[in-house]
């Protein structure tokens, strides 16, 4: 899992770097209690043993459980060895609060659940609260960064146009784009181009979608995503590459993508994904004319 890291923009007076791959915390938060606590620790330990050193979570992932579980599992690790990100603006029940006080309270509560310093803090999907996020929430993050209370700040959303607006209008360090830059959906490409031009790091999540993981060729379907996945898979197989392997490798081909988040809820799952990451994808695959046509 060792690969070149991207240096954060000069806006941050630190040597903050993002590893190429990280563990996303949503599935960790969804594990049922009480057995899920132990399963989460085993999963996070397996990720660490596989070389993963970036962990992302949020208050609304399992109503705070994800943060607590990451905090428990990572407390035994040397703090300087890994990076940790969480989000603010959405409470454990998902309700929004992008006021200045709400942002400070959200980060304080997250820090308490984690029991660890947060490296990267991001506004969590402020779409319908754009004005308040710009006028109240973002200045608080800017102050936290200036005071070195966090190393970097950003925004996380499944709407690339919202993220593009933040990149254009603020001096953030990173964006997390959920599901809109992957082997099957490259709609966020304009955002990544702007990130590259502005020195903003991009993090991709949701690359192992249902269509990638469930392409049963024996089952009839009219789902365009599954049809596309099957066609891409057929090309990949000619090069000895599985569709999930290609899906994990694809986002990092854009130089703006600093890290790809992998969601996993068991040690077997994260070990399998880590094994895929370690397998090289032949450069010839990406030059294949049919694949180029399918990727548009």
Image (cartoon, rainbow, N blue to C red):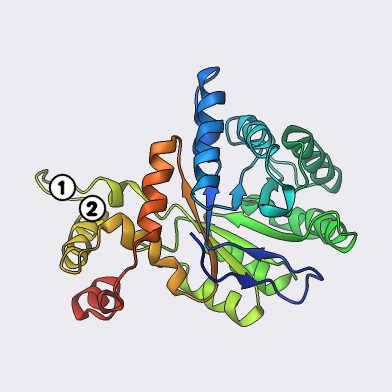
Category of crowding for the residue at label 2, using alpha-carbon neighbours closer than 10 angstroms: few (below 14), some (14–19), many (at least 20):
many
Residue 291 percent location from the top left of the image: 23, 73
Q: Nearer the viewer, residue 40 or 65?
A: 40
46 relative to 22, above or below: above
Q: Is 229 situated left or right of 111 in this image?
A: left
Viewer can see residue 184: no
Q: Where is the C terminus found, in terms of image quarters?
A: bottom left
Label 2 sits on a secondary structure element that is helix
Q: Nearer the viewer, residue 73 or 148?
A: 73
Residue 185 numbered tag: none
Q: Pointer 2 and pointer 1: residues touching (CB < 8 Å)?
A: yes
Residue 59 percent location from the top left of the image: 66, 37
Residue 176 percent location from the top left of the image: 58, 58
222 relative to 34, above or below: below
Residue 221 numbered tag: 1
Where residue 77 sits, quadrant-wise, is top right
**Residue reaching furthest to the top:** 34
Viewer can see residue 231: yes
Who's the residue at 20% across and 64% down the image? Answer: 240
Category of crowding for the residue at label 1, using alpha-carbon neighbours closer than 10 angstroms: few (below 14), some (14–19), many (at least 20):
few
Label 1 sits on a secondary structure element that is loop
Q: Which residue is mark 2?
A: 226
């Amino acid at each position: 899992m060792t690969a070149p890291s991207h240096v954060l923009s000069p806006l941050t007076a630190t040597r903050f770097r993002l590893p190429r791959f990280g563990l996303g915390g949503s599935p960790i938060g969804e594990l049922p209690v009480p057995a899920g606590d132990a399963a989460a620790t085993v999963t996070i330990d397996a990720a660490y043993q596989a070389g993963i050193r970036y962990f992302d979570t949020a208050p609304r992932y399992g109503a705070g459980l994800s943060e607590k579980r990451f905090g428990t599992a990572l407390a035994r690790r040397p703090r300087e060895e890994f990076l940790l990100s969480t989000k603010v603006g959405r409470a454990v029940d998902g309700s929004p609060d992008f006021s200045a006080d709400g942002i400070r309270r959200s980060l304080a509560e997250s820090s308490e659940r984690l029991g660890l310093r947060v490296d990267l803090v991001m506004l969590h999907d402020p779409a319908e609260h754009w004005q308040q996020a710009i006028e109240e929430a973002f200045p608080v993050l800017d102050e936290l960064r200036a005071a070195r209370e966090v190393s970097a700040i950003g925004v996380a959303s499944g709407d690339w146009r919202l993220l593009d607006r933040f990149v254009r209008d603020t001096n953030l360090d990173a964006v997390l784009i959920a599901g809109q830059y992957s082997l099957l959906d490259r709609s966020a490409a304009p955002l990544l181009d702007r990130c590259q031009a502005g020195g903003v790091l991009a993090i991709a999540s949701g690359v192992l979608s249902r269509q990638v993981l469930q392409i049963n060729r024996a089952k009839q379907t009219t789902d365009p995503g599954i049809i596309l996945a099957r066609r891409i898979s057929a090309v990949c197989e000619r090069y000895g590459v599985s569709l999930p392997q290609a899906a994990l490798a694809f986002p990092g081909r854009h130089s703006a993508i600093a890290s790809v988040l992998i969601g996993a809820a068991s040690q077997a799952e994260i070990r399998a994904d880590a094994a895929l990451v370690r397998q090289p994808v032949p450069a010839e695959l990406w030059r294949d004319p049919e694949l180029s046509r399918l990727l548009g």
